[in-house]
Structures are given as C-alpha cells and as structure tokens.
Image (cartoon, rainbow, N blue to C red):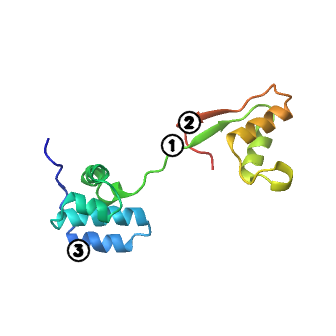
Amino acid sequence: MSAIEIARQDLSISQLRAEAARTADAKQARRILAIAMVLDGHSRLLAAQASAMDRQTLRDWMHRYNADGLAGLADRPGLGVSLVWPKPSGAKWRSGWKDGPDLKTDGVVRWRCADLRDRIAAKFNGSASLSVQVGTALEP
C-alpha cells in the first residue's frame, strides 16, 4: 500500500503557514501546520508528532485536506443528542432543560439524561419516560 500524497497545490507552504497563523481554531492550525511540514519534505511521523497526533490521524487529515482544502481541516459539528419530551407538558420541561438546573433546588450543576429522567418520572409518578435519540442534532 502506498502512502497518500497531498494532491492539492492551491496554497504554497508559506500560504499554509499564514493561514494557520490567521485561524482562531488551534486544532485546525495544528492540522494546517502538519500539512505544511509534509509539503516541506518532513517525514509524516515528524509532522504528526509536532502536531500532537499520530501518523494515522495525520493521514486522515490529509485525505480531508485533499477533498475539501482548508475547510476540511476544521472540526465538523457532532451529531449530538436530541431529547424527546413527554406530552402534554413537553414545552415546560424543554424550557427548564434549556435554562439549566439550580443547584439549590435541583441538586445538580448541569443536566444529565439520568437527572432529567428522574425528574420527569417523579413529576409523572413514573408514568412518563425520557428517550434519547442519538445521531440527531442537539437542540439549541
């Protein structure tokens, strides 16, 4: 199996370094610098180590750079978790969840699914449940 090559030539090594300096995302900057090091002739192992990743991870980022350019080196938002609220009072529970817990009354500093499940079960005498759908966008 041959090593992946960086196919994109739209930015020079110095332009890549300038882009890394401009970005506010430190992870993306490290990835850009790793790509620049490889283009500059450094070994992939050295470029990966200098950028705090392993060689396989650098290889994956090289694939994304080849496909999408600098935008491919940015983190993509995760799928998150979506909560399905019980009816008929789902709107009340949604707003309470978005506002966050109160340490004095709720006993927690941030909501976990288990905390919400227990609160909903107590409110509805155990007759309602909270289901979590993984792989859908997180509600704002």
Q: Nearer the viewer, residue 118 or 88?
A: 118
Q: Which residue is mark 3?
A: 14
Q: Nearer the viewer, residue 78 or 27?
A: 27
Looking at marks 2 and 3 on the same chain, the residue that comes earlier in the sequence is marked by: 3
Q: Alpha-carbon neighbours of circle 2 within 10 Å: few (<14), some, or many (≥20)?
A: few
SS at badge 3: helix
Residue 82: quadrant of the picture: top right
Tags 1 and 2 touching, CB below 8 Å: yes
Q: Identify the element where label 2 is drawn.
A: strand
**First-in-chain label (3 vs 1):** 3
Q: Residue at x 52, y 37 (%)?
A: 135
Left or right: residue 124 compared with residue 95: right
Q: Which residue is mark 2?
A: 134
Q: CA distance from mark 2 to mark 3?
A: 42 Å
Per the image, the residue denoted by label 1 is: 79
- Report x, y in % for residue 11: 22, 66
Quarter location, residue 18 = bottom left
Residue 10 is at least partly visible in this image: no
Q: Amino acid at mark 2?
A: Val
Please name the residue shown 51% across and 43% down the image. Answer: 79
Q: Report if the CB atoms under discs 3 and 1 are less than 8 Å apart.
A: no
Mark 3 packing: few (<14 Cα in 10 Å), some, or many (20+)? Answer: few
Q: Position of residue 24 (x, y in %)?
A: 44, 69
